[in-house]
Image (cartoon, rainbow, N blue to C red):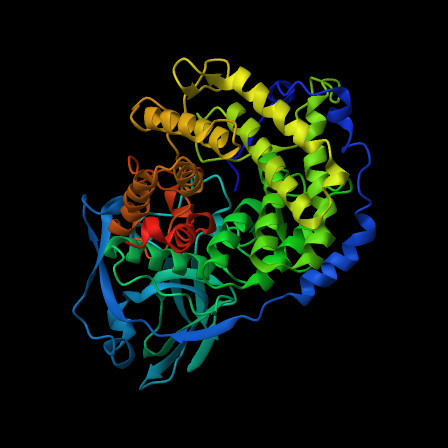
Amino acid sequence: MTALHKLTCKVALSLLLCASLTPQLQAQDASTPIAFATQREAWLQKAAANMPQLSETHHAPQQIVRSVQDPQAFQGWRMEASGEPIDSLYTQSFKARKTVILDFGEHLTGYFTFRVNHMGLPADAPIRFRFTFAEMPAELNTPFDPYPGGLSRAWLQDEIVSLMRLPETLTLSRRLACRYVKIELLAQSYFDFTFEKIDFKAVTSATQRVEPLDPSTDPRIARINDVGLTTLKECMQTVYEDGPKRDQRLWIGDLYLESLANTYSYQNHQLTRRCLYLLAALADEEGWLHATVYEYPTPLPQTHQHCMDYSLLYGVALNEYYKATGDRETAEDLWPVVVRQIGFARTYLKDDIYDMQKQPSWWLVFDWKDQLDRHASMQGLMTFALDQSYELARLLGREKEVSEWPNALKAMRKASRKCFYDARNGVVRSGAEGQISHLSQVWMILSKTLTPKEGQRALELVLSDSTACYPGSPYAYHYLIEALIECGMDDQARELLISYWGGMVENGADTFWEVYDPKDDFKSPYNFFPINSYCHAWSCTPVYFIHKYKSIFQR
């Protein structure tokens, strides 16, 4: 994840100064950082103790296919059956074939094994192949080089392999995520050869049987649910990964949404617990969470990756985890982490904390939408996170420790209405130019800054306004649906889920994508759409909506 938004210090300060809190409330819970160093080892041990066991299944390719250029297809390409029996791959000369595209029939995450043997004369020289693995058809039909993308070229799933002696069986060391594999013969000698075996060992930590849907559920929603479950399953590895093809690590924002979907499906709460401890153990010296962490070769943070909105969502995730599991030990252990994230965010209420010439060392995510003004959204999210974190305090009987939080909430909501709410027109505006966006309304609704009636009016306005800044990713659409439900707009929430996630299904999605804009098939935050993740954690939440709100979606 790279194209996140960095706020200048001046903007960050003006953002939260509008809360108009007293100096006591501004500094109270940020002045005494938790001594996280004394807890790191214990938290790492608990993270390790909750390492899930991965289940393994073996899959063979289902058919031989060919790419067809089609302007009506998503990104201009689709696959169709070649008409060749799959057995021909193992019985006929590959030297004569030279290239083949195999379809496994479903998205898989794991390890690719193949075996090649000579036919007749023994091998007198090495043979060389290129393997290209793809989640979507266009990935196999878009030249990777010269590479224009903003992330490492190495994330693209192509491998060149040379075999020295036959027969030989080889398992590629790289873990892959794909539905299709293209095999190209690059170099050979006089002898002939064929593939004897192709196997894909898929891995996941999602094993629990999921509650079936009501038989009366709309088939469109049933299909969305299936694709969402597959998306979540593929991203549930030894952490909640944001994408099994690219990044392959834990991000706080993805953790929160994956854990919601997991609670209403696979119920692997052990994985949630592991991720919460891992993030806490790898906080910086002041106790501020890094937005993303690595597992291997040993657990490490991605330093200098602080996302203010993500760190605040940690407490929301812990609160939801505690309500789902009743695991008081984990909630008590990690409660100081929540307090520290709130405390750090509130230091931005002090207008002399930073040299105004410096850039802050944190980012804002919210959406893949460069033009989105994030002022109102950030104010709303901080209020939402503070509210949810105070709920956790009450559940743990620790509200006296943060007794000033309710007053802070009142002050922030009051200031938000003054700074951002255009009561005359019934809409939230953000930034110096008063931008109207879907997300500005969403976060003022979820933070309870707007009443449900006011929120309904605001949402109806932006949903009908073609000039409003609309969401650019499934991550943002998740929160839009949450806001619609909060305002009692159940029918609109249902139709949006069908139209947006159903749009991906209609475009051939086996798993839901990191980025989807119905107006732009080729949208990419990285300047090259094949590097996009087409199985992405933050896109799995139809599972959560469909199973939690049965009366809305299972009919």
- Above or below — where is 175 with respect to 554? below
- Above or below — where is 105 with respect to 77? below
**For the point 34% across and 47% down, which residue is it?**
143
- Above or below — where is 484 with respect to 376? below
Q: In this view, does 326 lie to the left or right of 510?
A: right
Q: Which residue lies furthest to the left in this view?
A: 83
**Based on the displayed image, in which of its 4 quarters is residue 554 positioned?**
bottom left
**For the point 38% across and 48% down, which residue is it?**
513
Count of marks placed on residues: 0
Q: Can residue 469 be seen in this view?
A: no
**Based on the displayed image, in which of its 4 quarters is residue 35 positioned?**
top right
Measured as percent of width and height from the top left, residue 49 is found at 68, 67
Q: Nearer the viewer, residue 119 or 34?
A: 34
Q: Nearer the viewer, residue 116 or 438?
A: 438
Quadrant that contains the C terminus: bottom left
**Based on the displayed image, in which of its 4 quarters is residue 41 positioned?**
bottom right
Measured as percent of width and height from the top left, residue 17 is found at 65, 19
Measured as percent of width and height from the top left, residue 329 is found at 71, 59
**For the point 37% across and 43% down, which residue is it?**
529
Q: Can residue 395 be seen in this view?
A: yes
**For the point 23% across and 53% down, which residue is it?**
78
Q: Is residue 544 left or right of residue 37?
A: left
Measured as percent of width and height from the top left, residue 360 is found at 66, 27
Q: Which of 507 and 52 is in front in this view?
A: 52
Q: Which of 41 and 345 is in front in this view?
A: 345
